[in-house]
Amino acid sequence: MAKVKVTQIKSIASATKRQQANMISLGIHRIHQSVEIELTPVTAGMIEKVRHLVKVEEVK
């Protein structure tokens, strides 16, 4: 599987509870924090739900 680097770029204060839960499940807790995760169908769906809050980059 491919790996992606996910970085939070916006606050989750105005996000819904479900979006906040997705961010925590991805392992992101604060602005400008980055995590590298495997891109599976589950994580891709989670990223899609919070795409307005994060920046996604492919890791080689």
Image (spheres, grey):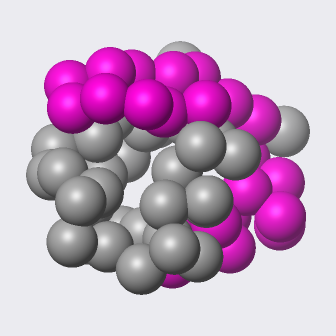
Q: What is the quadrant of residue 53 in the picture? A: bottom left
Q: What is the quadrant of residue 38 in the picture? A: top right
The residues colored magenta run: 27-49
The residue shown at (59%, 43%) is 24
| x and y, in percent, of residue 20 in the image | 49, 61
Q: In this view, does 46 lie above or below 12?
A: below
Left or right of 39: which side holds 57?
left
Left or right of 15: which side holds 19?
right
Left or right of 45: which side holds 32?
left
Q: Is residue 37 above or below residue 50?
A: above
Residue sitting nearer the eye, 54 or 30: 30
Residue sitting nearer the eye, 23 or 41: 23
Q: In this view, does 26 lie above or below 53?
A: above
The residue shown at (73%, 56%) is 43
| x and y, in percent, of residue 16 in the image | 42, 80
Q: Which residue lies furthest to the left in this view?
A: 10
The residue shown at (29%, 57%) is 12
Q: How many marks?
A: 0
Is residue 59 something one can see in this rendering? no
The residue shown at (32%, 73%) is 15
Residue sitting nearer the eye, 46 or 3: 46
Q: Quadrant of the N terminus?
A: top right
| x and y, in percent, of residue 23 in the image | 52, 50
| x and y, in percent, of residue 59 in the image | 50, 24
Is residue 46 something one can see in this rendering? yes
Question: Is residue 39 within the magenta segment?
Answer: yes
Q: What is the quadrant of residue 42 in the picture? A: bottom right
